[in-house]
Every structure is written in C-alpha cells, then in structure tokens.
Image (tube, rainbow, N blue to C red):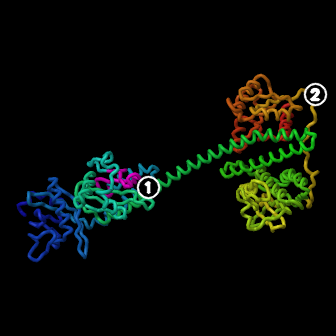
Amino acid sequence: MNRRIEATQNLLEVIPDILLWIDNEGKLLDYHPNNHAFLFEREGGSIGLSLEEIFNHDLNSQMLLMASNSREKKKLQSGQITYRTPEAVSRFECRIAPVDEHSYIVGWREITHLSESRKGDLIKGNSKATLILLTENSLEEAIRKSLKVLGKTYQANRITLFRNHFDPDSEEVFMTLQHEWSHQDVILSLDSLQLVNIPYNPDLTLFYETLKNNTPVIAITQDLTPSAQGFLHTLDVQSVVIMPVYVRNMFWGFLGIGDCNSPRVWKEEEVSAIKAISLVLGAVIQKHKDQEELTIARLHAEESDRLKSSILANINHELRTPMTGILGFSEILCEQLKNKEFQQMAQNIQISGRRLLATLNSMIELSQFEAKKALFKLKETKLNEIILLTCEPHLAAAKQKKLGFEIYMNESIFSFIDEKLFAQLLNHILENAVKFTNSGKVIIETGNRWDSGKSWSCITVTDTGPGIPKEFHELIFEEFRQVSEGYNRSFEGSGLGLTLSKKIAELMNGRITIASPEHQGSTFIIWLPSSQHSISEIQPIIMEQEFFPELVKFEDPDPLIALPSVLIVEDNRLNSELISIYLGSTYHCTLACDGEMAVELARNKHYEVILMDINLGNGIDGMEATRRIRGISGYQSTPIIAVTGYTMDSDKAEILAAGCSHYLPKPIDKGELSSLISSLVGKTR
C-alpha cells in the first residue's frame, strides 16, 4: 500500500473515508478504511476476501459493473452504491479507475448523512417544477422549463418524455420522443429519426407491459435485455429511471431520467420524487387536453350559435317581408270588400297571418333569451297604466268570445322593470287566459303583498277555463309544451308563451306562480319586487271597453296644402305598393328600389320622412344608404325610419347606430306607421 501512496495522494484528499484496491474478480488486495474499519472487521482479516463475502452480493455487483465500465472506457467512473444491513442503510459516493490490467483503485465517501438534505433538495426541485407546470399557459413551454429544473434536481444528464400512440391499421402501440432536456455536455436526441414511431412489439413488449402496469423500470443499462439495451444506447444512458405517465387512467407515455456517465444506483428518495413529478405531469397534460377540448367545444358551440342566429335572422327577415304584404293587403280587402263571404275570407287570412306572426315572434324572443342577447334596462315604473294599455287588445278578444273581462286596480304598484318586456310578459299570460276560457270571465287584479320577508307588486290573472292538473304545473313552463299535446291536442299555439313569461319574470328578479284546481279555472300571479310601499289609489272597479283610448284617427288632408313628401326605400314591390296605399291619400310618396337610387333621389330633393328597408338585395344595404344620406346637406336631422324584418335586439341597436332615427319591424302595422309619420311630420313643419 505504501508504494501506492504517492500515486493516490490526490484521490485520498478528495475521498478520505475508504480507499480500496481490488482485482478483476472483486477480491480485496488492500484497503485504507480511515474511521470505517468496523466494516472490514473479519476473523482472519479481510485481505483476499471478495466484496460479496465482506459486504453482500448487491454491493459486489454494483462495484464490478462500475469496474467493467471504467476499463471499457479507460477512464474514471463515478456513481453511488448502497450497503444494506438489517440494522441500517449506508450510502457511498464511489469513484473507480483501473490501475493495471488486473486491478482497480476505488474510493468511497459516505453520503448517508447527506440523505435528509438530499430529500429536501428533491422536494424543493419538484415544487419548483410543479409550479412551472401549473402556471405556464403553454404546455410545450411548461414541459421545457420543468425538465431543465428536474435535470439539475435529479443530477441527471438526460431527461426524456415519450408519448404513446396507437396505430389502428397495424393495431400496435408505438412511442415517439416528444420532449427532451440534456446537460450541456450531452448531445440532444430530439431530431433523431430513430426515436420516432418506435414499436414496443416485439423487442420491447416486456418493457411496455411493465410500464402499463404502472410499475417503473429502474435499471443499469447493461443489466437489461439486448433489445432494451439497444433502445437505451440510442439515448446514450448507462443508468435510468423510467416512470410511466398516466393521463385519464390511460398509459399515455413515460418520463425517463438518465445518467450518461456511470451506472448510477438510484436512491429511493430520488425514485419517489420522480414518481411524484410523473403524477403531476400526467395531471397537467390532462388539464391542457381538457382545456383544448373545451376550447374546441366552445368554438363549435359559438359557430353553432352563429349559424343558428344567422338562420333565425334570415328566417325572421324572409317571413316578415311577405307577411307585410299578406297582412297589409288582407287588411285593405277587409275594408274595401262589400261581399260578406269574401270579407270573411280576407279576415281569415288576417287571423292566420297574425297567428303565424305570433309564433315567429315567440321563437325569436326565445332564441334571444337562450343566447342571452335580449337587451333590457330596468327602471322604476308605475305598472298600472302599462297594465291598462296591455289589456286593450285582450278585452276586444274576450268580447268576441262573449267573455267578461274585469280589471281591479286595488292599489298602485311600482317595480323596476323593462316596460317592453313587462308588456310581453303580461300579453302572454292574458292571451292564454282568453284563449283557454270558453265561458265565464277573465279577471285582472293588482296589489301589494308581503312574502318571504319582501314586499312584492303582484298582478293576478284569473280565468274560468278548464284549469290545469297539478302534475302539469311545471311542464307548462317548458318550451313547446302544453297540457294537451299530440294529434288530439285541444288548443292551438306554439307552447312558448309561458316559457317566455317565466324567463322575463326571472330577468326582472320576479317569478310566476300558479294555482289551478282542475275544472275550476286558473290563477297566475306575476310577482315583481316592489320599489315602493303600498299606495291606496282607487276602489275596485270594472273597466269597460269605453275606458280605453281610441285609435288615432286621421282626417282627410286639405287639398290646398301641399302633401308632405315621403321617400319609400324598399326592394320588394308588394311591400312598397302596400306602404304607398297606406300613405297615399295623406302623403306624396316616392319609391326607390335600391340604396343607390335612394341616395340619388335624396340629393335631388329634400324629403320630410324616409322609410328605409335594410336588406335591399344587390348593392348597398339600407344602413349604408342611411349613412350616405346623412352626409347630404339638410338631412342631418331628417327622420329616417328603418322598416325591416331584422327584429333581433342586436339588429335594432346596429340599425339605429347606423343613423336611422326610428325603427318599425315588419310586418308593418298601418296604425303604428301612420301615427309615427304624423308625429314626425308635425315636428318638421
């Protein structure tokens, strides 16, 4: 040993704990134990004994493998060895190099005391990598950064992430290198074609089955089968921990942690740390897959909603445009025809057309609520006047059926509502009450109630119809549902009225309740949060038809006064003729069949009112025509009324933003059109 002191002085300074001199078979030729002499205490001494006899088979195998590698590579080899006894576990950092053809010099440094510190480093590194995986938006970037952290944490030379994929044609499973990190001294393998579409079968079948059973492969390369050695030699690793990665309980791929310099023996805490990070990695991959699927589903849903909105908008427009002609001309026929039979036919056309229009309106309203595109603004409002105005057409319908129609304004009621939506809500309830009642009466009452610790403004609608069995009280608020359904249903209708009523009530923070003993009529109560305390106003009264204001009447114009000029921009001949008939005796009408013609006419003459269709076929649309007309001198404040089949709330907002001052949906109501133009002409003159 003394003749070796000079040659090994530097090594002694680096690894002072134990120095061994062994032959090719692992027999001890000499040793310098320092303060570890107790390990070598044997009867008769330890010189000449093999490491297996002194320690155990496992340690002997570790040493001989490192020795073989050092001789093959003709350089110093480093690694870690573990010595286990029933009492304790000792860990050593080991360095070995050949001395001559027959022997090796081996240095051990005990690192058992560093184990707890090592656990702390592993936990810290795993935590840092986990944070990166969870916070990075890009999965690619998250894996790239985390592998770099893990490489330093595990003191590895190469980390790889392989992904499995199934080939339906061959019905085989393949693996492909997806991500890689390597130490700066190690060449990356990511571009190697050898690591793409590698079949597990037949050479790596055992490898696949082991990982598929959620069991890691922890091995020194030379201990594996030749096929597995060939695969790991491609990665240039001598020792490896291969941990399966599971995504949605499926064997997604594996994480490989490799040492390229020595046949390293991996510590238990290192293997545990690698297993923990593989679980995190699988969860993060699953999270990103879920996000991708949700994004795709959202995009598909948005595209579906866009197509649905587009289809509804087109159907809405295409139905409303001819409905203008059907309802308008049938109304004129009702007024002009003298033959009672023909007059009744025209009235039937009116009734059928209005029923179709009501169904269309309900479907459009429902689509807007479902898409959450309904525009509304809640403001404090006294409800009594709106209730009276809303009741007017239903009073007429009740009178036709010879029903009583009673309104009791017991109190003034106030709430935060959208007036238009509230009128729609009450219309649906009243329409059903009149429709389903064949004899008796409909009663409307107002009042304030206290319920669930709140004050409510209540509108009660009671009828003497057939009533609704209790088991149908929830069903009738579902879309397209009625108590009587199928081929034998008793009443017509789309089954959307109560659905819309419920949605509108909830939109205004209210609700609808029903009390309806079968065969004893129905009572619907609209509950809206009261904005004021009860104010007693009038005694209960029965409102007769004469109470309601009459429709506006227009007197024949004075022939000596020049008629107001109206420009009608409409590409549909029937609709333009109908509007001309509506206005012809009171106004001087000029027709334009497209946007360009309308702009040209406006340049040459000043019109007091312009009726603007939006869809004008080829050329510019009504919104662009409006913008151009607004740019002509004298037209900055001229009333431009949009008359269109586009009736979505979003359509209306866009149309008004384009420069139209007013908006009328198709089909056009003669009274509403005449009243609006009359009020506008009065202001401009």
Q: Amino acid at mark 1?
A: Ile
Q: Secondary structure at mark 2?
A: loop
Magenta stretch holds residue 75: no
* Residue 16: % across, % down: 17, 63
* Residue 191: % across, % down: 32, 45
Question: Which is nearer the eye, 656 or 171?
Answer: 171
Name the residue carrying label 2: 559
Tell me: residue 376, above or below residue 626.
below
Crowding at dot 2, Cα within 10 Å, few <14 / some 14-19 / many 20+, comes out as few
Tell me: residue 368, above or below residue 336.
below
Q: Is residue 20 left or right of residue 127?
A: left
Q: Is residue 40 left or right of residue 383?
A: left
Name the residue carrying label 1: 285
Q: Which residues are magenta?
A: 152-181
Question: As drawn, which residue projects farthest toward the top?
Answer: 604
Q: Is residue 577 left or right of residue 186?
A: right
Which residue is at a point 19% across and 69% down the rendered structure image? 57
Which residue is at a point 41% across and 49% down the rendered structure image? 141
Q: Earlier in the sequence, mark 2 or mark 1?
A: 1
Question: Which is nearer the eye, 600 or 164?
Answer: 164
